Image (cartoon, rainbow, N blue to C red):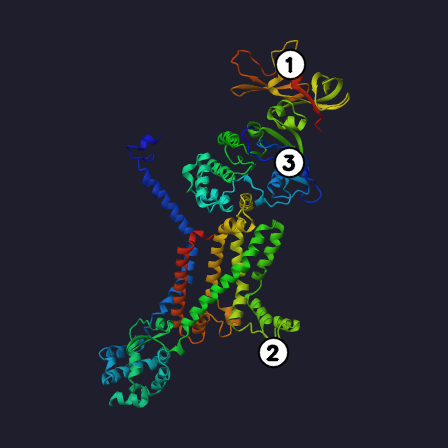
Amino acid sequence: MSDTTAGQVLTTKDGKPLKAALARALRREKLRSLALIAPLLIFVLLTFVAPILDMLFRSVENSIVEDTLPRTVVALRVWDPKSGEVPDEEVFAALYGDLLVAVEEKKHTRLGSRLNYEESGISSLFRKTGRRVNRMDEAAPFKEQFIDADDKWGDVGTWQVLRQFAPPYTDGYFLSAFDAQRTSDGIEMKPEDERIYMLLFGRTLFLSIVITVSCLLLGYPIAFLLAALPLRTSNLLMILVLLPFWTSLLVRTSAWKVLLQQQGVINDFLVWTGLISDASRLVMINNQTGTIIAMTHILLPFMILPLYSVMKTISPTYVRAAKSLGANDWTAFWRVYFPQSVPGIGAGAVLVFILSIGYYITPELVGGTSGIFISNRIAYHISSSLNWGLAAALGTLLLVAVMVLFVVYDKIVGIDNVKLG
Amino acid sequence: MANTRGAAVKYDGVQKSYDGETLVVKNLNLDIPPGEFLTMLGPSGSGKTTCLMMLAGFEPATHGEIFLNDRPINNVPPHKRGIGMVFQNYALFPHMTVAENLAFPLQVRGVGKAEQSEKVQRALEMVELGAFGNRRPAQLSGGQQQRVAVARALVFDPELVLMDEPLGALDKQLREQMQYEIKHIHENLGVTVVYVTHDQTEALTMSDRVAVFNDGIIQQLSTPDDLYEDPQNSFVAQFIGENNKLSGKVIGVQGEECLVELDDGTQLKADRVNVSDVGDKTTVSLRPERVEFDTNTSMDNLVNGQIEELIYLGDHIRVRMNVAGNSEFIVKVRNRGEKRKLNVGETVQVGWALNDCKALDAVV
């Protein structure tokens, strides 16, 4: 059988090379599988991947200046922002022409609010100038007329901002996300009192780690018990673990408000028992404590389930074997059981950490000001300040941070060691 | 056993119940002398594994006392009993290498590093796996894992080693090979071995003595040949080896012999093992290889039967006959290459000696 392959090429019945025929058959099989997943793939691409990519792209996209003021942008290229002087008449003439069109299309206010992110006051400048531009005299020099309309046109700073954000792509959002800014001297950190995002990133990471560790400490013994109990009892206990899953997230978070607030159940009880005085009721909500307690509770099942599914596969004979070999209960657990449960710890920790780093509702409701996460700030920029570019930059940073942590985790623990069941 | 360094084990009136209602082990009394290879043999649910687990310390005895070298061990936790154990699925720690697995019992005993590696290497060489120390258990074949498990149970020089169906997961050929290896290790080291299995061949091959368990009771405790030649009751006769059952009634007793009338009226002379008096119902047990076709009138029992089926098995031929109303009567004929032909449907006379058929308790 095998000796026929030595010299000659194997062929199919009709003489074609067997290797090619097999490859063709395999390719058809692959195409078929692709066709089967195609609807889902297209759906995910259109509704998930594409919007995310679009959103990420907004963090660098900045075509609004060029689109709204095309002639001004061209004219400004020859102006030296470090000269300390306002650009000359030619630029103002171009600005007049651009603004006429922009006011007609009502685009100048949008540009105003965009540039207002970079320097406050520009929004009102554009609105004010927009009202005046139609009444300007085309014969007289525009420079004086503009400065007359608003002093800010005579301010070099305004023009520096315009010039700086003229290109279609910008690193301004990312700089803001890093609490940095670009001045005429280059990039520098914002003044101490204006920095916020790095603090929020740091707090988000720190609280996520705290929440992950508390979930592990609380979840490990429960998962251990679940895996050790006979099936009937463990099923009942499992229902108790899963019960929170079937309750709305909002309801659970609100319940924590009721429990933790200063006039809440826990404080009332402690005062009643006399452990604390009425005057020194504990502050457990609207701060980091509230965020940690509520989120640990909410994310606990995500730690317990992977732990349980891994522990379920660890045969009790291993511990017995360890004991028969002379190990006491603790050694048997620590040297034999625990190492085998590490994949579950890995899976649970990654799951809880990644979920908590992007958590939004719970910190919003119970976090106060000291317990909010970076995601709350992103949500604020998406829905209130409408600074989508900055929101996108912050989101991109968060995504990159998670991916970096994931790679670090892979290096230390190894992704192969993560097991969900 | 001359070079023995094994421990003596004694079960004294031990009972075990899991639910407080039914006894899994009923009043077990068993003396195991130092250095013996004792096998607990029985069908599943017969209580043999429970007996082993009580000895290992994983199940508490609900009544009675277990002694190890005359020391009661009921209140000694498993890790202080110093008993080596080989588990059914080996229970090699998957996150440790073979060498680490073997070093584990030495580490927890605080043995020095140098002595550890020396003992580990010696134990690995004993099971001919000297070069495999750095492998993970998952990288070994079933037989190699089995040997590692044996080596791990022996590396800390226990006086007593328990084995809980250790060969169950191996294929037939490997199982037979391992049987001899374990037997040789036992002979070389002189440790006491308590071995649990449901495989009677394994029990007969390896053991000094076999305790046949059924229903929480030791049915018979004897050497392998005694078990086969002189079963004390129908269960043992049935469980060990192949066996023809003929049910009937005792109609005459004379010393150690008795006369049995089978259900169809045939009369047989049998060894009186487990019947007391005339009128007792009985099951006569007869090994298939003790039945002869070359009959002569000096034989104690001569019966006619019809051949129903012939099965050729190489070294012997299995003949299924209808004898005395029992159509499952098996006769094994050694294949001597003779021309003697047996034909299906033929009625022939078969005969056997009195000592080969035992009158045992009646099977209900």
- Image height of A66 relative to A301, above or below: below
Residue B262: image x %, image y %?
Answer: 72, 19
Chain assignment, label 3: B
Gap in Å between the C-alphas at discs 3 and 1?
44 Å
The numbered disc on residue B10 is 3
**Marks 3 and 2: CB-CB under 8 Å?**
no
* Residue beneath the point at 54% across and 19% down: B316
Question: Do pointers 3 and 1 mark residues of a single chain?
Answer: yes
Question: Do pointers 2 and 1 mark residues of a single chain?
Answer: no
**Marks 2 and 1: CB-CB under 8 Å?**
no
User: Which is nearer the N-term, disc 3 or disc 1?
Assistant: 3
The numbered disc on residue B351 is 1
Gap in Å between the C-alphas at discs 2 and 1?
105 Å
Side of A120 where B161 appears, left or right: right
* Residue beneath the point at 42% across and 37% down: B130
- Image height of B300 relative to B122, above or below: above
Side of B22 where B55 appears, left or right: left
> What's the amino acid at mark 2?
Ala
Q: Nearer the viewer, residue A194 or B337?
A: A194
- Mark 2 = which residue? A279
Chain assignment, label 2: A
Q: Nearer the viewer, residue A409 or A357?
A: A409
Quarter of the image where one finds residue A97: bottom left
- Image height of A213 relative to B67, above or below: below
Gap in Å between the C-alphas at discs 3 and 2?
70 Å
Q: Is residue B215 visible?
A: no
Q: Badge 2: few (under 14), some or many (20 or more) residues near its Cα, within 10 Å? A: few
> What's the amino acid at mark 3?
Lys
Q: Badge 3: few (under 14), some or many (20 or more) residues near its Cα, within 10 Å? A: many
Badge nearest the viewer, 3 or 1: 3
